[in-house]
Amino acid sequence: MHENCTVCGLHYAQEPSFYSGAMYVSYALQVALFTVYVALRVLFNPAAEVYMATIIGAAAVLFPVTFRLSRAIYLNFFYSYDADAKKVEP
């Protein structure tokens, strides 16, 4: 992630371990991904190896997305986005 917002200049690194809470958001996103397991199990009833490989593969491929998305979601718990904010030049 960038160190500062390109629009409003908000410094993303708020304090040491600020993003520890993002671990819980990331966990929630991974649990949501686990619903793929339930959908496979209910719809297709594949062998155990197939759905385990699917879940592990999807989690590995989507890890960079969930990593950044969880940080952005956690940051938005504490700061609201202002579309009319003045752009701050560094």
Image: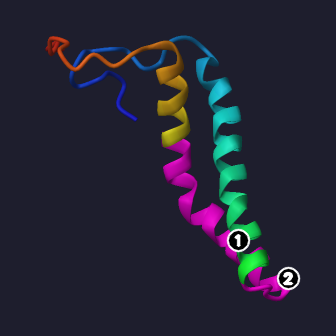
Residue 73 left/right relative to 47: left
Q: Which colour scheme is used?
A: rainbow
Question: Going 49% across and 41% down the picture, which residue do you hit?
Answer: 69
Q: How crowded is mark 1: few (under 14 residues within 10 Å), some or many (20 or more)?
A: few
Q: Which residue is drawn at 23% across and 25% down?
A: 6
User: Which image quarter: residue 45?
Assistant: bottom right
Asked whether, in this view, residue 33 is left or right of residue 8, the answer is right
Q: Is residue 20 above or below residue 28?
A: above
Nearer the observer: mark 1 or 2; the answer is 1
| Residue denoted by label 2 | 48
The image position of residue 2, as x and y in percent, is 35, 31
Residue 13, above or below 42: above
Identified by mark 1, the residue type is Ala
Residue numbers of the magenta segment: 44-68
Vertical arrangement, residue 41 with respect to residue 71, above or below: below
Q: For residue 16, which quarter of the picture?
A: top right
Image x and y of residue 46, in percent: 78, 87
Does residue 45 appear left or right of residue 9 in this picture?
right
Residue where numbered disc 1 is placed: 39
